[in-house]
Structures are given as structure tokens and as C-alpha cells.
Image: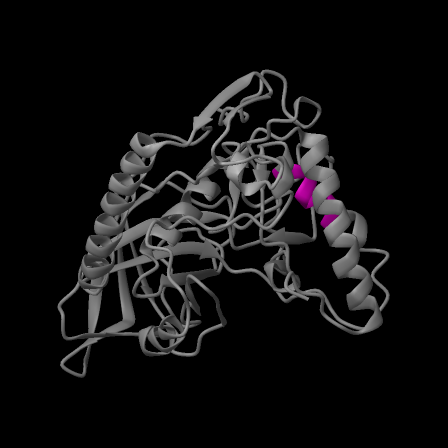
Amino acid sequence: MQAGPFVPSNAFSSLIIGGLIKINGVQAPLTLSKTISKPGKPLLTRVEDNATLGGLPPVRPPSKLPPPGNLCLQVSLEPERLGYGRVGSVYPRRIDDSNQYALPSLVIKVASRRRSDDLAREAWFYEEMEDIQGVAIARCYGFFTAEIEQNSEVLGWAESDADYDEEEVDVRGEDSPSEDDDDLAEPWNPYASTDYSPEDLVIEATSGWEILFKRNEEYEKREKLRQERRDKRDQIIRSTRAELASTSLSVLVLERLGDVIPIGVPLEALKPDVHEIYSDMGRFGIKHMDIRWRNILAAPATDQSIVCPYHGHKHQWRVVDFDLSRKSNFSHSRIESSADRWLQTILDGLEEGYVVEPWD
């Protein structure tokens, strides 16, 4: 790592990685190109008291970055991963790697074989929260992709393939929300309720929506055709996604952070800071949707942090993993209070010596 000020996060248009792939059993450097991220799926509320003024998610603030650069970043990876999850594995940059530019310590998040779309969404959330990179979240230096040969052996893919075989894959890349789903703006379905007969004409008004349902032969015929088209589409996606993904590799270049929150010790001193970093994210309309102990890491040990523009001091903690996150029209106070409740449960558990997970 070189001392700051660091190069802008959009300074690199290409990336050369050593230690990531083998071709016919031989290590080979891989060149990747900067790629456009994929917008995250919105999360909207139909409850006016919970929504922002105007009912729309906050607009992304204008970027403060200079025009995109055309530099090439060269890195070599250590073979032992720092962590892994649903989307991919995280590998550190080699300590003895030469550093051409002023950069913090870096890690490379490598998407699993079938998770490039998820990593592209995560990259988009880093871009949305540009103003709090190095403040409440890690600095992100871009999303990069490359086409690779079919016989390439990619670091970490064998393990992620084994995990994939055991999980149910959503071919549309749409993840069910885990927070406040009672507030989501979803079409009202009278047939889900026993209060209505499917044979009846049902009219419902919800926040100005008038939804008319009439079950008859014509309606059933249309629905059958729609379902057949959906089934055919999903079959095509399933049959082609693995083939396409098997020749494509994507990575995210991130600032390396510290350890997780300690377990079994008093945490009163750090609790306010953890709550504040989630408050910072809420100002951008971002709901993390994956608040977990392993997704809150210490800020870098060296003095690289930026003073928070909202709290007037440097935060000691950072949030990571945004592949499940949503850009929402929930008010800042609503996002903040929702995160605070769950954070309190997690932090109280850690003080008592155990980890609380969302599925517990």
C-alpha cells in the first residue's frame, strides 16, 4: 500500500490478474476490462408514512470523480481466500506485489461460475454510494470481466460449483426480500385470501390502485399461455446460462478491510458507530437486506478513512456484501429504524458470546 491521496476509483479501465486461472494446468495472467454494472432491483413501499417525499427512491448524487481514466492495474493473488459466500470468493493481493499507483491494500472478489449478474449488481450499489466509499463502505475500484477458454481452471470455482449443485438457482436473478416484506408494493391477489370466491368480481383499492379480477374461461386461457411462455423462457435461460457463464469471469476490486466484530466482549463503545454506518447508507435509500455479523468489518488499520460528512468523524467499521441490497423509496428514518432493530439483536448476541443469523 502506498500513502494517499489514492488514485480515483474510476482510474482503471483494465486489470491484469496473476494467480487466478490455469490453462491446461499452467498458471496464466488474465486481462479483464472494466464493465458496466447492473442496476439493483428496486424495493418500494405503498405505505405513505414509510415512503420518501414524492414516493420515489433518492436520486444518485452527482459524481465527484474526474473523467474515467485509462490505467491498467496489475495484481497477483494469494491462493488462500479470505472469505466466501453466495456470490463468490475474496482473495488478497500478494503482499510482495509491486504497487504502481497510490492505492490502499486490495482484495479481489471473484464471482462464482454462475454469479456474474449478482456481482454486477453489487458493483452498482458501490457506485450508488460513491460518497461514502472509504467512510461507511469499502472503496471500490471497479467491476471487470473477461472471456476465458473452456478448459480454464479458475481459482475457487471448484468449491463454488459444489455449493451451486446443492442450492436452488433463481434464473432471473431476483432474490426474495428478507426485511419488511409487508410494506412491498406488490399486485394485490384476491385469490390468496379465503374472503373472496374466485368466481366473484372483485374490486380492490390500495393506495389509489384499482385492481379488477374476474375469473372466467378467457382469463384462464390467457394465464395458461403466459405461464407456458414463462416456462419456456426459464428453460432457455437455465440451459444457456451455465454455458455462457462457464466462459465468462467477473471480479470486483475492493479495498481490504479488517476483522469482524469480536465475540464475548463488551461492545458498548462500538455500537453507536455500527448504527451510524447503516444510517449513512439509508440516506441513499439503500436497504442492505443482508445484515449479518460477517458483513460488518473493521475499517483499515492504517489512517485511510474519510471523515463522515453526516456524523463529523471517522467511522471505525464498514459494511460489505451488497448483492442482495435494494434501492428503495423508504424514508431515511424508516430504513434506519429497521436496521437498528436487527443490529441491536446481533450486537447483543455477540456480547453474550453467540452469533445471530437471519435464519435463526
Name the side, left or right, on which 168 lies relative to 324.
left
Judge left or right: residue 194 versus residue 102.
right
> Which residue does the image show at 54% across and 36% down from the upper left?
197
Q: How is the image coloured?
A: one colour
Q: Which x, y percent locates residue 6?
A: 47, 46
Tell me the magenta residue range: 274-281
Q: Is residue 303 above or below residue 333?
A: below
Q: Position of residue 353 (x, y in %)?
A: 80, 74
Going 33% across and 30% down the picture, which residue do you hit?
67
Q: Residue at x 83, y 67 (%)?
A: 351
The answer to whether residue 313 of the structure is visible from this angle is no
Q: Is residue 275 above or below residue 267?
A: above
Q: How many marks?
A: 0
Name the residue at 75% across, 39% down.
337
Up-down: is 300 above or below 281? below
Say which of 115 and 318 sits in front.
115
Residue 22: x and y in percent read 21, 77
Residue 147 lies in the magenta-colored region = no
Left or right: 114 with respect to 141? left
Q: Is residue 158 above or below residue 347?
A: below
In the figure, is residue 344 to the left or right of 181?
right
- Which corner quadrant holds the C terminus? bottom right
Quarter of image, res 165? bottom left
Look at the image and tell me whether residue 4 can be seen: yes
